Amino acid sequence: MPWIPDDAERHTHKAATWALKELWAKVANECLERTGNEGRAIREANAVVARQVKAGY
């Protein structure tokens, strides 16, 4: 089941804006499709959002 941007709130507090939530869902869904591993998909999406926040996005 693909994730939607609103799912980001349950997995990371750093996705505070709609753009970051959309990014989180995009990364998580792409990783899930590529690997089939939900845990890895969530971790990768969290890492991407964290890097964006650190960069001042």
Image (cartoon, rainbow, N blue to C red):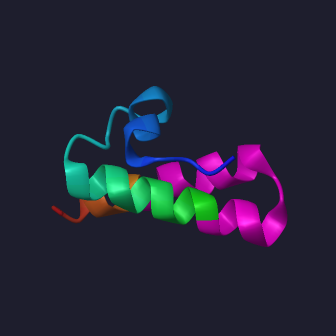
Question: Overall secondary structure of the magenta stretch?
Answer: helix
Stretch of the chain drawn in magenta:
30-48
Residue found farthest to the top: 10
Does 43 lie within the magenta span?
yes
Left or right of 27 on screen, residue 34:
right
| Left or right: 55 in relation to 24 | left
- Judged left or right of residue 14, residue 28 is right
Instruction: Tell me if residue 31 comes above or below residue 47 in the rendering.
Output: below
Q: Quadrant of the C terminus?
A: bottom left
Total residue callouts: 0
Residue ID at (22%, 50%): 18
**Residue 20 in which image quadrant:** bottom left
Q: Position of residue 39 (x, y in %)?
A: 74, 43
Give x and y (percent) for residue 8: 43, 40
Q: Within the magenta stretch, is there residue 50?
A: no
Position of residue 35 relative to residue 14, above or below, is: below
Instruction: Give the x, y percent position of residue 49.
Output: 38, 55
Image coordinates of residue 25 in percent, x first then y, are 47, 55
